[in-house]
């Protein structure tokens, strides 16, 4: 291909759009409202769309992998935000060591599964 890709932005649904908006803001993403039904959430060069749409089978099968430099540090910072206490249904796992690196899991209020990981460098 001769063209260079600049970003990839998945579309995420939300069972409760307003609740999910607050969750992602509290996580640390900046919201840009595009319409009453759609927002883009950004952090540095990363972005995704959150839409006022809920299809249970779709949400239950949505997973996002967020690569970070240091998953242990990221987990500590995420834990300090107390999202699990503040949002019903939100779950944060402990950091797991895998043969490829480390990861933890965060479920958003709708049940979307975020894999937050750090790849080994050998």
Image (cartoon, helix red, strand yellow):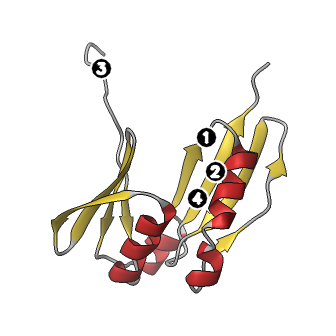
| Crowd around label 3: few <14 · some 14–19 · many ≥20 (10 Å) | few
The residue singled out by tag 1 in the image is: 68
User: How far is the residue under mark 1 from the one under mark 3?
Assistant: 23 Å
Q: Nearer the viewer, residue 63 or 120?
A: 120
The nearer-to-camera label among 1 and 4 is 1
Label placed on residue 114: 4
Q: Earlier in the sequence, mark 3 or mark 4?
A: 3
Residue 7 falls left or right of residue 83:
left
The residue singled out by tag 2 in the image is: 116
- Residue 3, image x and y in percent? 25, 18
Circles 2 and 1: CB atoms closer than 8 Å: yes
Circles 1 and 4: CB atoms closer than 8 Å: no
Circles 2 and 4: CB atoms closer than 8 Å: yes
Tell me which corner region of the image, top left, top right, bottom left or bottom right, holds residue 120.
Answer: top right
Q: Earlier in the sequence, mark 2 or mark 3?
A: 3
The residue singled out by tag 3 in the image is: 4
- Residue 14, image x and y in percent? 39, 75
Circles 2 and 3: CB atoms closer than 8 Å: no
């Amino acid at each position: 291909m001769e063209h260079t890709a600049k970003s990839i932005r998945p579309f995420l649904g939300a069972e409760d759009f307003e609740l999910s908006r607050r969750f992602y803001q509290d996580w640390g993403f900046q919201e840009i409202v595009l319409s009453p039904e759609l927002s883009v959430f950004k952090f540095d060069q990363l972005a995704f769309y959150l839409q006022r749409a809920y299809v249970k089978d779709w949400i239950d099968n949505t997973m996002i992998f967020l690569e970070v430099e240091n998953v242990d540090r990221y987990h500590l910072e995420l834990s300090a935000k107390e999202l699990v206490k503040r949002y019903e249904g939100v779950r944060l796992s402990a950091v797991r060591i895998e043969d490829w690196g480390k990861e933890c899991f965060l479920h958003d209020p709708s049940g979307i599964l975020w894999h937050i990981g750090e790849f080994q460098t050998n």
